[in-house]
Image: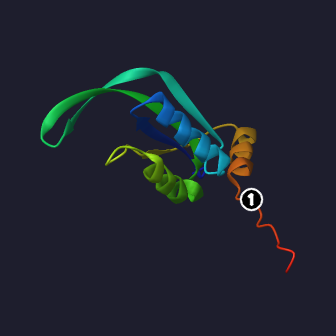
């Protein structure tokens, strides 16, 4: 396995999708997030009824080791009671691209305070 994953998240609005995408990249939880900006139609079962809604899809590129923190941040920012957060393993790909993902999600080194 490569240790890289693609995480799919659906959002109820383009604004929410942008907010989650920006937070994920700024916090180094994702190297890149694609937002499918045209709404897609979702049909799903919720509380015993078949529902439908327009949603926006996030395609998040990250690593397995950053998934738990990414998941927590998506849940914190998301408006849904039960947001879709699905991680798919990446089996193969370009080594240079994988290196870029790893570097992009590497946690920033802790800054030393003047007291240290």
Residue 97 versus residue 103: which sits nearer the camera? 103
Residue 78 versus residue 7: which sits nearer the camera? 78
Q: Give percent across and percent down for residue 76.
A: 46, 53
Q: Is residue 58 visible?
A: no
Q: In the structure shown, which secondary structural element does the residue marked by tag 1 occupy?
A: loop
Q: Give percent across and percent down for residue 16.
A: 48, 36
Give the left or right position of residue 100, taking residue 63 as reference. Answer: right
Answer with the quarter of the image where residue 114 lies. Answer: bottom right
Residue 45 versus residue 102: which sits nearer the camera? 45
Q: Is residue 1 above or below residue 56?
A: below
Which residue is most to the bottom? Answer: 115
Residue at the spot 38% in from the left edge and 28% down from the top edge: 55
Q: Give percent across and percent down for residue 7.
A: 49, 43
Which residue is most to the top? Answer: 38
Q: Is residue 39 above or below residue 18?
A: above
Give the left or right position of residue 32, taking residue 109 as reference. Answer: left
Q: Is residue 101 above or below residue 114?
A: above
* Quadrant of the drawing holding the C terminus: bottom right
Q: Give percent across and percent down for residue 13.
A: 43, 30
Q: Which residue is mark 1?
A: 108
Residue at the spot 53% in from the left edge and 55% down from the top edge: 67
The mark total stands at 1
Q: Is residue 35 visible?
A: yes
């Amino acid at each position: 396995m490569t240790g890289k994953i693609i995480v799919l998240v659906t959002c109820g609005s383009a604004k929410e999708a942008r907010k989650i995408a920006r937070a994920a990249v700024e916090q180094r939880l994702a190297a890149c997030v694609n937002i499918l900006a045209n709404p897609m139609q979702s049909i799903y079962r919720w509380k015993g009824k078949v529902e439908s809604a327009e949603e926006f899809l996030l395609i998040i590129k990250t690593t397995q080791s950053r998934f738990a923190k990414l998941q927590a941040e998506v849940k914190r920012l998301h408006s849904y009671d039960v947001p879709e957060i699905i991680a798919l393993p990446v089996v193969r790909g370009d080594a240079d691209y994988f290196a870029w993902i790893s570097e992009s999600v590497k946690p920033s080194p802790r800054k030393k305070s003047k007291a240290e």
